Amino acid sequence: MLQGTEGQRKTGAAMIDVLCVAAGGAVGSVARYLLSCVPVPGAWPTMTLITNFVGAVLIGIVAGLAPARLSPHATLLLKTGLCGGFTTFSTFSLETVTLWQQGRTGLACLYAAASVGLCAAGVLVGQAVAGSLARG
């Protein structure tokens, strides 16, 4: 009977993990959708770049706060769920390839470099914010 109880405990814990990821992913995905509805003129995929930068900052903050200040469930909800649902790497990749296929090679390269550079900087900003929050 103890094995069954242990197995049930593990299954229950795994289900809580899944629910944390799902809840965060739902919020992140809806937030991404709402940002994609903001009209922006021009060929530059502005909202995807902004979304990925904000997501990079958020994941930097979460990574900087976990595990000292965030529970494993909160980390799953925020990092895997919210940030995973919010950021748009697949959209970024499609937009880069589309720009390339349209003959806008320079813009495609600039967009790819800006996305990677800005999002890496966003993670650094997020980690700095987390460090400030951790110090009080």
Image (cartoon, grey):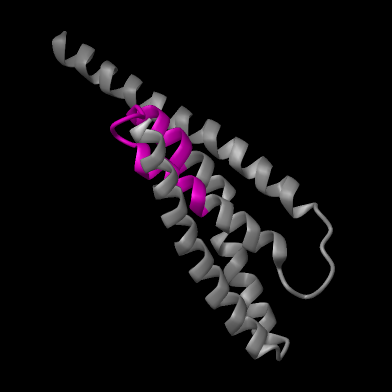
Residue closest to the eye, 53 or 94: 53
Residue closest to the eye, 8 or 103: 103
Badge count = 0
Specify the segment rendered in magenta: 56-80
Quarter of the view holding residue 16 = top left
In the picture shown, does residue 96 fall above or below 36?
A: below
Could you tell me residue 13's position as x and y percent?
A: 33, 23
| Residue at the image position 64 percent from the left and 58 percent from the top | 50
Q: For residue 73: magenta?
A: yes
| Residue at the image position 61 percent from the left and 76 percent from the top | 111
In the picture shown, does residue 35 fall above or below 89?
A: above
Quarter of the view holding residue 71 = top left
Residue closest to the eye, 98 or 49: 49
Could you tell me residue 115's position as x and y percent?
A: 56, 69
In the picture shown, does residue 39 fall above or below 78?
A: below
Extreme-left residue of the structure = 2
Type of secondary structure dominating the magenta stretch:
helix
Residue 111 lies left or right of residue 78; in this view the side is right
Could you tell me residue 30's position as x and y percent?
A: 68, 41
Q: For residue 11: magenta?
A: no
Residue closest to the eye, 94 or 51: 51
Residue 53 lies left or right of residue 132; in this view the side is right
Residue 81 lies left or right of residue 8; in this view the side is right
Could you tell me residue 76's position as x and y percent?
A: 40, 36
| Residue at the image position 53 percent from the left and 40 percent from the top | 82
| Residue at the image position 73 percent from the left and 86 percent from the top | 102
Residue 71 lies left or right of residue 99; in this view the side is left
Instruction: Point out the image quarter for the N terminus.
Output: top left
Extreme-top residue of the structure = 1
Instruction: Point out the image quarter for the C terminus.
Output: top left
